[in-house]
């Protein structure tokens, strides 16, 4: 008898679901290559993706142009093994028995860094955290 193992599921949440959570989801999807089920959502979704976030992932060969901001759905929240809340703006009530983490991500704009330079710093901060999370979830 073969044992099937369910792949771990991660929900990345930020306030608008246009930047940070989309970055994290895109990075995890590329790294995990199907070994982790990945979702992203926003507590107050905006109208469209942050173009600089899209461009910064495209530089790494990650295409998220088919994505769109979406609200936190109860079924996705319930199904996720790990919920990662990125940044300081999003507020989400932890669920009992579910792993919740709050990532206070780098915010270069507080240091006067804007544009693509800012986005690269944000992306790279999130990328290192995603790599660590991936290793924890998969043992790789």
Image: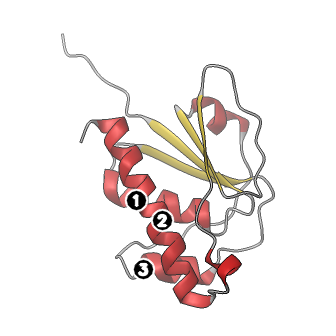
In this view, which residue lies farthest toward the right? 44
In terms of secondary structure, where does tag 1 sit? helix
Mark sitting earlier along the chain (2/3): 3
Residue 65 visible to the viewer: no
Q: Position of residue 57 (x, y in %)?
A: 45, 75
In this view, which residue lies farthest toward the left? 1
Left or right: 127 with respect to 83? left
Q: Which residue is mark 2?
A: 125
Residue sitting at x 74%, y 52%: 71
Instruction: Calculate the distance from the C-alpha at mark 2 to the C-alpha at mark 1.
Output: 6 Å
Q: Which residue is mark 3?
A: 58
In this view, which residue lies farthest toward the top? 1
Instruction: Calculate the distance from the C-alpha at mark 2 to the C-alpha at mark 3.
Output: 17 Å
In terms of secondary structure, where does tag 3 sit? helix
Label 2 with label 1: CB-CB less than 8 Å: yes
Mark sitting earlier along the chain (1/3): 3
Left or right: 102 with respect to 125? right
Residue 12 visible to the viewer: yes
Residue sitting at x 42%, y 34%: 8
Q: Quadrant of the C terminus?
A: top left
Residue 114 vs 82, above or below: the answer is below
Residue 118, quarter of the rendered image: bottom right
Q: Which residue is mark 1?
A: 128
Crowd class of label 1 (few under 14; some 14 to 19; many from 20; radius 10 Å): few
Q: Position of residue 58 (x, y in %)?
A: 42, 80
Q: Please state which of residues 101 and 73 is positioned toward the viewer in this rendering.
A: 101
Crowd class of label 3 (few under 14; some 14 to 19; many from 20; radius 10 Å): some
């Amino acid at each position: 008898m073969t044992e099937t193992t369910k792949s771990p599921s991660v929900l990345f949440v930020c306030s608008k679901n246009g930047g940070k959570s989309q970055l994290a989801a895109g990075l995890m999807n590329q790294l995990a290559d199907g070994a982790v089920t990945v979702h992203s959502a926003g507590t107050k979704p905006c109208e469209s993706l942050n173009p600089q976030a899209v461009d910064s992932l495209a530089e790494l060969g990650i295409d998220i142009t088919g994505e769109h901001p979406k609200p936190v759905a109860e079924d996705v929240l319930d199904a996720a093994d790990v919920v990662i809340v990125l940044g300081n703006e999003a507020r989400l009530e932890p669920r009992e028995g579910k792993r919740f983490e709050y990532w206070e991500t780098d915010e270069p704009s507080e240091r006067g860094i804007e544009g693509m330079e800012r986005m690269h710093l944000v992306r790279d901060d999130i990328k290192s955290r995603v790599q660590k999370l991936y290793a924890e979830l998969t043992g790789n």
